[in-house]
Every structure is written in structure tokens, then in C-alpha cells.
Amino acid sequence: MRRDVHYQTTYSLAIEAGFDPTEAEQIAAANKKTDKDYPATVLSGLGSLFSSVTNYSRHFNAIKSRLLGKDSRDKWAEYYLNLALETGDVSRLGQGLHSLQDKHAHQGILAQTDVSIFGKKIIATKWRDDPKINREGFLRAQRETSQYLQRFLRSRASKNNA
């Protein structure tokens, strides 16, 4: 999804879910920063043939994972949800949400056609990240973002009450 989705929509949904503004900011900032910290490149895409743990696999369904029937982005989302619960670091939720949101934007064969050389995109399929064009994907990403944040809050509350 576009940066405004990774940041602004995430921030708004975190506030709506019940996070305070400081936590919502941490979640949204970590979500947006995932593209910078874990860029998907052609080489990381090729690496996904052998492993489902690549930068590529955070944004696109890794080829190995696709062959095994489990979406690599779901694996990242669950990993970071559990890490956030273990550590109390809500920024981990932002990293998990990035993969969850990209799952709805980066679908189909055209999603695999981005080509970057030295960080500069030469071929980029922009339509998939545009909420105005990919409205269905945007709405699914919003719904899953809300559910993910609620899961964390319920688990945290349950853990604190135990």
C-alpha cells in the first residue's frame, strides 16, 4: 500500500481501536519505515525461491511460501504480533501490519513486476497501491488492520488481567 496508507490510515485505525496517540504514532511510523528498512529487490525476490525469510517476503508472497500454500506475509504478521505481545513493543505491530496491508495491494502476477537497480525503480506497477483504483484491496487491508490491532489489545488485556 502507499505510504499514506501505511502511515495515516494505520494511525487512524490504531486510534479507533483504542491505542493512545503515542502508541498509534509508534505503530504507524514502524509500518511506514518497513519499506526503508526491508526493501524488496529483484535479488531478494530470487532469494525467495530458496527461503521464505527475505525482504521480498515481507511485501510479496515468497515463491517458496507460495509453493507450500502459506502466504509469507501472513507469517510475518503473526511473527510480529507475537513479538509485540512478548516484548510490549507496539512498533512491532507496525512491522506486522506492513506485510498484512501489502498482501492486499500486491496480488497477482503484475505484483511481481517491480524491478529496481541500485534502489531506483525501472519498472513499477503503481495501480495496486492506489486506494482509488484498488478500492477492494484497500478496504480488505483496512478491515484486517483493525482486526489485527484488536487481537493485540485483547491479548494484552488478557495477559495483564492474568
Image (cartoon, helix red, strand yellow):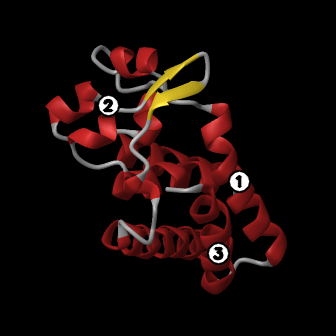
Q: Residue furthest front?
A: 122
**In front of the other: 160 or 138:** 138
> Residue 13: in sight, yes or no?
yes
In the image, which disc is placed on residue 91? 1
The image quarter containing residue 18 is bottom right
- The amino acid type, in three-letter code, at marker 2 is Ala
Residue at image point 38% right, 22% down: 45
Of label 2 and label 1, which has the lower sequence position?
2
Measured as percent of width and height from the top left, residue 64 is found at 24, 25
Circle 1: element type = helix
Which residue is pictured at 21% across the width and 35% down the height? 66
Q: Residues within 10 Å of mark 3 (few under 14, many from 20)?
A: many
Residue type pointed to by label 3? Ala
The residues tagged by marks 2 and 3 sit, at their Cα atoms, a distance apart of 28 Å
Distance of label 2 from label 1 (alpha carbons): 24 Å
3 or 1: tag closer to the N-terminus: 3
Residue ID at (43%, 49%): 126
Callout 1 amino acid: Ser
Image spot of residue 122 (x, y percent): 48, 26
Q: Which mark is residue 69?
A: none
Residue at the disc numbered 3: 14
Q: Which mark is residue 62?
A: 2
Q: Position of residue 58 (x, y in %)?
A: 46, 38
Along the horizontal axis of the image, is 124 left or right of 96? left
Q: Earlier in the sequence, mark 2 or mark 3?
A: 3
Mark 3 residue element: helix
**Mark 1 surroundings: few (<14), some (14-19) or many (≥20) residues within 10 A:** many
Of labels 2 and 1, the one closer to you: 2
Which residue is pictured at 63% across the width and 85% down the height? 16
Cα–Cα span, label 3 and label 1: 12 Å
Judged from the image, the secondary structure of the residue bearing numbered disc 2 is loop
Nearest the viewer among 41 and 123 is 123
